[in-house]
């Protein structure tokens, strides 16, 4: 998948309205007022991103590892294009757009990884 060179502001979309902003614990403020559309991540992309977050010590613990193991055990998840993109740190935000977690630092990356963990759990 080719990542289109567009501005970060255009890349970001509100995840699920004001409720998602409240749950994100201030992530919107860290990313210029908008949340990445984590809700559009496929099971494969969520699993790959979860692996990225664990590998890069953004998330730790048995919970993340268990969710990752269970999700990658589902048919087609670990072999999907979205999984490969996620392992490289790319959140596929829908409509051909993507966000690289490598571009994020500190709390912003941690919050995205927390949202990805929640998204990954939703596939189980």
Image: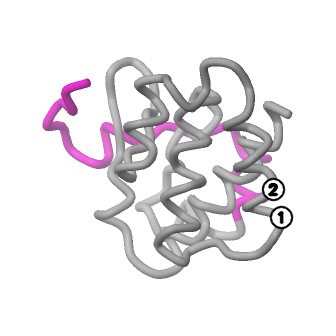
Q: Residue 51 occupies which quadrant of the picture?
A: bottom right
Q: Quadrant of the C terminus?
A: top right
Whole-percent x, y for residue 76 in the image? 61, 19
Quadrant placement of the N terminus: top left
User: Seen in the image, is 105 located left or right of residue 71?
Assistant: left
> What kind of element bears circle 2?
helix
- Identify residue for label 2: 66
The residue segment tinted magenta is: 1-24
Please say if the residues under marks 1 and 2 sit with CB atoms less than 8 Å apart: yes
Q: Is residue 28 magenta?
A: no
Image point 39% across, 58% down: which residue? 101
The residue furthest left is 5
Looking at the picture, does residue 119 appear above or below residue 33? above
Reading the image, the residue beneath label 1 is 63
- Can the viewer see residue 52? yes
What's the distance in space between the residues labelled 1 and 2, CA to CA? 5 Å
Measured from the top left, where is residue 80 in percent x and y? Answer: 48, 23
The quadrant in which residue 120 appears is top right
Residue 55 locus on image (x, y percent): 50, 68
Q: Is residue 97 left or right of residue 72?
A: left
Task: Categorize mark 2 by other alpha carbons within 10 Å: few (<14), some (14-19), many (20+).
Answer: few
Residue 41 falls left or right of residue 6: right
In the displayed structure, would residue 27 be above or below residue 99? below
- On the question of residue 16 being in view, the answer is no
Residue nearer the viewer, 5 or 10: 5
Does the magenta run of residues contain 18? yes
Across and down, in percent, residue 8 comes to 28, 48
């Amino acid at each position: 998948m080719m990542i289109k060179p567009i501005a970060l502001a255009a890349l970001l979309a509100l995840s699920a309205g004001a409720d998602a902003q409240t749950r994100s614990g201030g992530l919107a403020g860290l990313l210029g007022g908008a949340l990445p559309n984590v809700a559009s991540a496929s099971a494969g992309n969520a699993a790959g991103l979860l692996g990225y977050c664990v590998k890069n010590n953004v998330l730790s613990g048995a919970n993340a590892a268990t969710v990752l193991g269970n999700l990658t055990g589902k048919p087609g998840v670990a072999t999907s294009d979205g999984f490969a993109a996620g392992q490289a740190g790319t959140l596929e935000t829908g409509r051909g757009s993507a966000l690289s977690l490598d571009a994020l630092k500190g709390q912003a990356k941690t919050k995205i990884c927390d949202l990805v963990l929640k998204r990954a759990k939703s596939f189980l």
